[in-house]
Amino acid sequence: MLQSKLPIKYWGEALFIATYLINRIPTAVLDNLTPFEVLYKEKPHYEHLKAFGCLYYASTLKRHRDKF
């Protein structure tokens, strides 16, 4: 967010979005289901998602990989 010069007033919104995304990412703890699936009994939709306000890089390295 610093690299994109996103104003601090939007950082709280970015935190909400991070939480939203984490709840839609499969996790081994739930047998590769998402928290959304467990709660609502349906798969989440992803077509409305898009990147905003920051640089991002795709990584396929298996070492040190986590949700963050």
Image: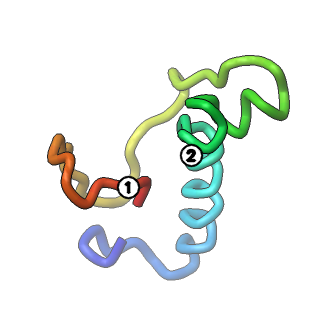
Q: Position of residue 22 (x, y in %)?
A: 57, 49
Question: Splitting the image into 4 quarters, where does residue 38 fall?
Answer: top right
Residue at the disc numbered 2: 21
Residue 57 — which label?
A: none
Instruction: Give the distance between the C-alpha atoms of the residues marked 1 and 2, in whole angstroms.
Output: 13 Å
In this rendering, is residue 25 above or below 53?
A: above
In this rendering, is residue 9 above or below 59?
A: below
Give the camera-side residue of 63 and 17.
63
Give the camera-side residue of 44 and 31.
31
Q: Is residue 3 left or right of residue 40?
A: left
Q: Position of residue 40 (x, y in %)?
A: 84, 27
- Residue at the spot x=82%, y=21% of the render? 41
Q: How many numbered markers are drawn? A: 2
Q: Is residue 57 left or right of residue 54?
A: left
Q: Residue furthest bottom?
A: 8
Residue at the disc numbered 1: 66
**Picture quarter with the N terminus:** bottom left
Which element carries disc 1, helix, strand or loop?
Answer: loop
User: Given this view, does label 1 or label 2 mark the residue nearer the observer?
Assistant: 1
**Sequence order check: which comes first, mark 1 or mark 2?**
2
Three-letter amino acid code at the position of disc 1: Asp
Q: Is residue 62 left or right of residue 29?
A: left
Q: Residue furthest top?
A: 42
- Residue at the spot x=65%, y=60% of the render? 16
- Residue at the spot x=31%, y=78% of the render? 2
Mark 2: few/some/many CA within 10 Å (<14, 14-19, 20+): some
Question: Splitting the image into 4 quarters, where does residue 17 fall?
Answer: bottom right
